[in-house]
């Protein structure tokens, strides 16, 4: 509980610091160190308990996905937790001083604190998803912290490189964890590890463990992912000390150790880890000499240390795991300390160039002591924790069938690490002051004590190695290995490992003496290539490739897009129909009327393809449409037949009006013959796919549950005998609601498009009349008031027909609930009447005849439908649920209900839509143009009639 | 009959796809019209066709008699007819606007961001 509160405290403090921003003060560091220290103490107090039996605590987080905030606290997690919090307390107080002159200081300090929280969760959690989330959190925070100097391009590149590398690893980790979760049937890491035999037998096991290892190796910057770590040194030094030395890079090692019991069941695990760790050491050893930057040199030595840790997890014998646990703590203490030292040197002298730094012993004595303590531990001088770790490491490499080269790599790598540290961290103090030495370099206690404390801790731990090993290190090591861990001691006596330590020291002396020739050789051989150059090249190639692919695929030719989409869809249909194929339905072969009707469909379409004039094509499509209406009628769908007929009629009207407005569109355009063949091929595939899919559908039994429900409930529940209408206005009224809104939007779109056309190109429209080949327009081009085809017969008969048609529309609307009809059909009949009036008398007259503006009609239609829904919500408890009441008229009672009201809304919207479209189309001067809100909505609204007379002719 | 109707639907789709892939904007609209009809018929036929009568409950009866046409696809298609009408109208208006304002009639010119 204390621990959770401490983590929560870290999050609160961190977030507070990030938000407040500005420069840091010393108390910010104290504030940050408070929860950190609390967590440290809590972990320390639990140590004796947790070693007996691990502490397990679970809180549900996303129970539906089986994700829980569960914690599993055993020796290994306590070990890591102590490192995270211990180094954290030192780094936070140090960072408060470091960032005191940085305007973004608080932000970065806050992110460091958040990082500590994420890191604690990472090492303590038992849930694989929580583990992944905290893992990625550390990657993202690392990105933000490396990019602290976000105005520096190099820092940005380094941050991106670190993020992409560890991010890719994170994805692999997630995949791997999920595979293991599948294999074990549990998201709990401890359960997965306990079920080792089951998991290892699962077919996904090798993939899962391999992907986890991949993720861990990227995080710990192991070969071949080592390149991001030296670049990450662009980060502020407290960040480098904390993330890139003491903790985050250890997260990978921690995970490797955590899943080691599983990994050891795989044959590739041991060679993989030993190989990756060893190669990391080799690469770092070879490349390190190139650098002059003390901090970069620290990064290379860190890589050597991480490589040896990875190797130890891979070797996994009792000595290796003991060495792993010991070195992990020792390295965190001495390397953290050295980073803090170099940060201070950099801050006071302004340089990290090892050729310039000298004589600092005199001006920074306390810092020197800290560096010295840290160095002797790193060098493996007896009585330090580093010595204990190194002895164990050499012992581990000498066991069993390991090739001698492993031992050689360990010795040479360690010698190089010592030489690097001596060059970068000792000589600046030891050398007598040279000409480049800054004179005013001095130290302050506020950031000298922390490296001192960290380094001193390494010495104390070394002296107390035996009890420390018994209580913490050995139990932690036991979790990661196959054998009982080797007992730790401050001194192991004179043996081969000690001799190797001596050899290492001697070799490092040689390396230090031969440093500059080595550095020249390294530079000559390796050239100027920076680490990660290959990665950056790959990245820019990827970006260029993506750009090229985008240019190829997103070329902007709409027809080609359409062709690709249709061809892919058709292929999908054909294959799906093939996979689900069944028996063909019976094929009626006797020639009959129905087959003739079916034949009319493709016939009309074929004429449309061959047609040279648009109106011919449209008319032939009308034939198809009417044939479809007849098919609907024949197969028991009178509502559909009516709707189809009306829509076909109105569509022809609209087509005719459009053709009257614009220069006749060209139908056949010159194009290469193979385009036609190719498109015909695509068309046949899609069409064949549709037929095949339809036939396949017929071969499986249909599920009539929903239809039967509607059929049974229509009368008792919806008080309507026309099931189709009841579905539309009651059962599925919400869908219908959406549809009438879409319809209204289409009308508004049409009106808006045609209005801009009228405003912008009056001249062109005037010219159109002459070259327009449309038969509708050749007859006359009278003023709008006269209508389009102003035949006398039409003009005389329409006013008489009008009331009848409208009455019929209302009749159809009202009977709709019980007989074929309803809002849609009634609305369409009324619209057809309006269309007729538009043709005979023109737009303005139509507008005058119907006092209601279309947009008002549509809006009130939606409002009525909404009202019907709201009444249902108020009285029945559900939006659009039908509410019924009886209205006594004379002797009979009439049932009235909100579905009727809703249908009225549908009716109004349909009429308004059609009216708006027709009026927008009729002429450039149609009064509808003043009826549209956009663009000119700030102007006072014009009366319809004035707009007609005022508009330009 | 289902077989012939399925074939007819497929042929309609074939015609519509071919038309939609032509460079002429007008032909694209024609293709769209056919496609709307074809899909409506597709939904209708996939809900099974029968000649037993429309989905109207007899006066006095409480439930639809067995064998009546399937009301569900009809409800779907009814609104679909109206919606595809809206779509075709809108596309037509778009075509008209493009034709009159920019003289554009072909569909295979690549889209350029700078176009006014």
Image (tube, coloured by chain):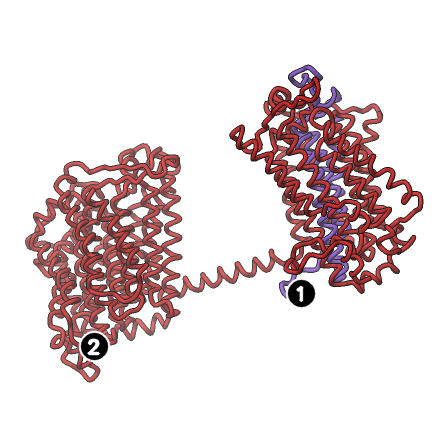
Chain colours: A red, B purple
Q: Does A742 sit left or right of A128 as displayed?
A: right
Q: Chain of mark 1?
A: B
Does mark 1 fall on the same chain as mark 2?
no
**The N terminus of chain A is located in which quarter?**
top left
User: What is the x, y in percent for residue A496?
Assistant: 12, 55
Q: Which residue is outermost to the front? A: A890
> Camera-side residue: B60 or A268?
B60
Q: Which residue is outermost to the bottom? A: A435
Residue B116 badge: 1
Residue at 72%, 34% in the rendered image: B41
Residue at 86%, 37% in the rendered image: A801
User: What is the x, y in percent for residue A898?
Assistant: 62, 30
* Disc 2 and disc 1 in contact, CB within 8 angstroms: no
Q: Quadrant of residue B75?
A: top right
> Camera-side residue: A99 or A236?
A99
Q: Does B78 sit left or right of A664 as displayed?
A: left
**The C terminus of chain A is located in which quarter?**
bottom right
Given this view, does label 2 or label 1 mark the residue nearer the observer? 1
Q: Does A855 sit left or right of A492 as displayed?
A: right
User: What is the x, y in percent for residue A922?
Assistant: 80, 51
Q: Quadrant of residue A246?
A: bottom left
Residue at disc 1, secondary structure: loop
Q: Chain of mark 2?
A: A
User: What is the x, y in percent for residue A870?
Assistant: 56, 35
Query: Would you name the residue on which mark 2 appears?
Result: A357
Residue at disc 2, secondary structure: loop
Residue A675 seen in this snapshot = no
């Amino acid at each position: 509980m204390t621990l959770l509160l401490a983590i929560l405290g870290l999050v609160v403090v961190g977030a507070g610091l990030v938000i407040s921003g500005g420069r840091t003060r010393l108390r910010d560091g104290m504030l940050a160190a408070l929860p950190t220290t609390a967590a440290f103490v809590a972990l320390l107090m639990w140590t004796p308990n947790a070693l007996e039996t691990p502490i397990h605590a679970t809180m549900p987080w996303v129970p539906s996905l089986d994700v829980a905030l569960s914690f599993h606290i055993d020796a290994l997690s306590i070990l890591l937790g102590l490192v995270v919090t211990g180094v954290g307390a030192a780094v936070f107080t140090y960072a408060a001083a470091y960032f005191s002159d940085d305007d973004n200081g608080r932000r970065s300090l806050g992110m460091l604190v958040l990082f500590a929280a994420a890191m604690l969760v990472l090492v303590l959690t038992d849930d694989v998803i929580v583990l992944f989330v905290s893992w990625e959190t550390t990657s993202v925070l690392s990105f933000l912290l490396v990019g602290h100097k976000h105005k520096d391009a190099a820092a940005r590149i380094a941050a991106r490189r670190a993020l992409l590398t560890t991010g890719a690893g994170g994805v692999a980790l997630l995949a791997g964890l999920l595979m293991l979760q599948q294999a074990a049937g549990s998201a709990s890491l401890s359960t997965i590890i306990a079920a080792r035999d089951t998991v290892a037998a699962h077919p996904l096991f090798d993939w899962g463990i391999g992907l986890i290892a991949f993720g861990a190796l990227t995080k710990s910057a192991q070969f071949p992912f080592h390149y991001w770590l030296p670049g990450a040194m662009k980060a502020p030094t407290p960040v480098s000390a904390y993330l890139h030395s003491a903790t985050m890079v250890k997260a990978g090692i921690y995970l490797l150790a955590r899943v080691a019991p599983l990994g050891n069941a795989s044959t590739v695990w041991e060679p993989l880890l030993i190989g990756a760790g060893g190669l990391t050491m080799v690469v770092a050893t070879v490349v390190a000499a190139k650098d002059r930057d003390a901090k970069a040199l620290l990064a290379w030595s860190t890589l050597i240390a991480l490589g040896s840790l990875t190797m130890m997890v891979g070797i996994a014998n009792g000595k290796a795991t003991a060495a792993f646990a010991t070195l992990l703590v020792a390295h965190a203490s001495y390397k953290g300390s050295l980073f803090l030292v170099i940060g201070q040197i950099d801050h006071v002298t302004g340089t990290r160039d090892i050729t310039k730094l000298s004589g600092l012993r005199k001006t920074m004595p306390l810092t020197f002591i800290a560096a010295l303590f840290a160095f002797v531990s790193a060098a493996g001088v007896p009585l330090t924790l580093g010595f204990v770790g190194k002895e164990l490491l050499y012992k581990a490499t000498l066991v069993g069938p390991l090739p001698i080269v492993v031992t050689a790599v360990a010795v040479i790598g360690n010698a190089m690490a010592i030489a690097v540290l001596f060059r970068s961290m000792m000589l600046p103090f030891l050398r007598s002051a040279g000409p480049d030495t800054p004179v005013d370099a001095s130290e302050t206690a506020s950031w000298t004590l922390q490296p001192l404390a960290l380094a001193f801790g390494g010495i104390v731990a070394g002296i107390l190695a035996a009890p420390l090993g018994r209580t913490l290190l050995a139990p932690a090591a036991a979790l990661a290995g196959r054998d009982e861990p080797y007992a730790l001691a401050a001194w192991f006596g004179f043996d081969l490992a000690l001799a190797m330590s001596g050899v290492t020291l001697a070799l490092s002396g040689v390396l230090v003496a031969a440093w500059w020739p080595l550095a020249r050789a390294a530079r000559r051989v390796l050239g100027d290539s920076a680490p990660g150059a290959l990665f950056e090249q790959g990245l820019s190639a990827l970006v260029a490739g993506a750009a090229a692919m985008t240019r190829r695929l997103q070329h902007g030719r709409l027809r080609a897009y359409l062709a690709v989409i249709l061809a892919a869809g058709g292929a999908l249909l054909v294959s799906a129909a093939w996979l689900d194929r069944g028996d063909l339905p019976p094929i009626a072969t006797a020639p009959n009327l129905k087959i003739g009707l079916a034949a009319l469909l493709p016939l009309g379409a074929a004429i449309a393809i061959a047609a040279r004039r648009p109106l011919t094509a449209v008319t032939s499509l009308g034939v198809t449409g009417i044939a479809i209406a007849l098919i609907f009628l024949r197969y028991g769908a009178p509502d559909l037949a009516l709707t189809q007929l009306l829509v076909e009629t109105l569509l022809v009207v609209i087509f005719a009006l459009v053709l009257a407005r614009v220069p006749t569109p060209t139908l056949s355009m010159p194009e290469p013959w193979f385009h036609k063949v190719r498109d015909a091929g695509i068309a046949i595939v899609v069409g064949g796919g549709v037929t095949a899919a339809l036939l396949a559908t017929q071969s499986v039994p249909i599920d009539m549950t929903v239809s039967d429900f509607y059929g049974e409930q229509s009368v008792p529940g919806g008080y309507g005998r026309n099931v189709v209408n009841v579905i539309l206005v009651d059962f599925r009224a919400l869908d219908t609601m959406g549809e009438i809104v879409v319809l209204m939007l289409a009308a508004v779109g049409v009106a808006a498009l045609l209005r801009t056309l009228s405003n912008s190109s009056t001249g062109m429209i005037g010219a159109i009349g002459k070259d327009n080949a449309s038969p509708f327009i050749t007859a006359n081009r009278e003023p709008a008031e006269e209508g389009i085809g102003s035949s006398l017969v039409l003009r005389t008969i329409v006013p008489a027909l009008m009331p009848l048609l409208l009455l019929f529309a209302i009749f159809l609307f009202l009977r709709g609930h019980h007989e074929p009809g309803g809002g849609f059909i009634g609305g369409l009949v009324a619209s057809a009447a309006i269309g007729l009036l538009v043709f005979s008398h023109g737009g303005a007259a139509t507008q005058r005849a119907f006092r209601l503006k279309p947009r008002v009609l549509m809006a009130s239609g939606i409002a009525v439908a909404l009202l019907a829904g709201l009444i249902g919500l108020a009285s029945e408890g559900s939006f659009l649920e039908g509410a019924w009441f009886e209205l006594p008229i004379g002797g009979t009672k009439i049932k009235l209900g909100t579905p009727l009201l809703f249908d009225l809304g549908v009716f109004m919207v349909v009429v308004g839509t059609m009216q708006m479209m027709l009026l927008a189309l009729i002429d450039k001067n149609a009064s509808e143009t003043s009826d549209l809100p956009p663009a000119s909505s700030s102007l006072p609204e014009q009366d319809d009639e004035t707009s007609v007379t005022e508009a330009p002719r | 009959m289902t077989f012939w109707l399925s074939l007819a639907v497929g042929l309609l789709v074939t015609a519509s796809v071919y038309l939609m892939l032509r460079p002429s904007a007008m032909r694209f609209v024609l293709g769209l019209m056919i496609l709307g009809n074809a899909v409506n018929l597709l939904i209708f036929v996939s809900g099974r066709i029968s000649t037993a009568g429309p989905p109207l409950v007899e006066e006095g009866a409480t439930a639809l008699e067995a064998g009546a046409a399937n009301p569900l696809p009809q409800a779907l298609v009814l609104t679909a007819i109206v919606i595809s009408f809206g779509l075709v109208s809108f596309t037509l208006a778009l075509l008209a606007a493009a034709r009159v304002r920019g003289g554009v009639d072909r569909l295979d010119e690549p889209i350029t961001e700078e176009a006014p």
